């Protein structure tokens, strides 16, 4: 393991731009896998009940339901 870390440090020193772009790509792959389920859970928690179709039609046409 120490040998791999040593080679990784050398790579980062020799190619900082490539190493940084690899880190950015890793974050780009990791974030959607974590953030998307969290956002989905928020959306299902605050779902609004769907209005009745007759209410929607009355609102669009301007006719009041009695």
Image (cartoon, grey):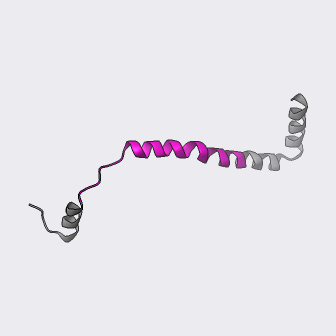
Give left or right: position of 47 versus 19.
left
Determine the residue located farthest toward the top in the rendered image.
2
Q: Relative to residue 43, is residue 1 depicted above or below? A: above
Give left or right: position of 19 versus 47.
right
At a point 36% along the width and 47% down the height, the residue shown is 47
Give left or right: position of 18 versus 36.
right
Determine the residue located farthest toward the front in the rendered image.
53
Nearer to the camera, 50 or 25? 50
Asked whether residue 42 is drawn in magenta, I would say: yes
Q: Quadrant of the C terminus?
A: bottom left
Residue 13 sits in quarter: top right
Q: Quadrant of the N terminus?
A: top right
Which region shows up in magenta? 25-52
Give left or right: position of 45 versus 16.
left
| Number of callouts | 0
The rendered magenta stretch, by its main secondary structure, is classed as helix
Asked whether residue 43 is drawn in magenta, I would say: yes
At a point 18% along the width and 66% down the height, the residue shown is 58
Residue 30 pos. (x, y %): 65, 44
């Amino acid at each position: 393991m120490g040998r791999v870390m040593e080679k990784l440090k050398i790579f980062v020193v020799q190619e900082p731009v490539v190493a940084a772009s690899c880190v950015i790509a890793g974050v780009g792959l990791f974030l959607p896998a974590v953030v998307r389920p969290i956002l989905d859970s928020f959306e299902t928690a605050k779902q609004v009940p769907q209005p009745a179709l007759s209410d929607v039609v009355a609102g669009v046409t301007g006719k009041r339901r009695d």
